[in-house]
Amino acid sequence: AVNIVTRKPADDKAASVDITLGSFARLDARAALGGALNSATLAGRLVVSSRTADGFGQRPLAGDRSGDEDSQGVRAQLHWAPSAAMD
């Protein structure tokens, strides 16, 4: 089983950017932005990511490269707490 746990939205404003470069045209980029959206009841977090690489070996029967990667993703979260008792 796979269990993925993500960082929950918080009231504090936060932003981050991560970039990784490597061999075979590897480029991984991730940006995250989060914080309170109104007073103290609604917080949000948005993460955008991209991974690309040209691969490291030819696969003649398949007609592509082994390790070739091209993917993008977006994740958005909202946290609503109408009162402290419901957080």
Image: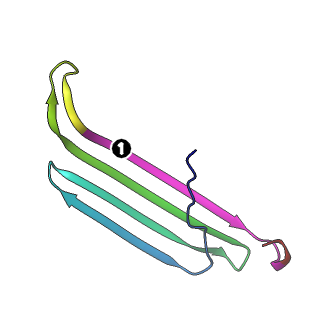
Residue 67, position in %: x, y?
A: 24, 39
Q: Which residue is mark 1?
A: 71
- Element marked by disc 1: strand
Residue 18, position in %: x, y?
A: 33, 67
Which residue: 47% across, 60% down? 47
Residue 1, position in %: x, y?
A: 58, 44
Look at the image and say whether residue 75 sits in the magenta stretch: yes
74 vs 84: above or below: above
In which quarter of the view is residue 9 placed?
bottom right
Residue 56, position in %: x, y?
A: 16, 41
Which residue: 26% across, 62% down? 20
Look at the image and say whether residue 14 sits in the magenta stretch: no
What range is drawn magenta here?
Answer: 68-84
For the residue marked with disc 1, what is the amino acid?
Ser
Q: Quadrant of the C terminus?
A: bottom right
Q: Residues within 10 Å of mark 1 (few under 14, many from 20)?
A: few
62 vs 70: above or below: above
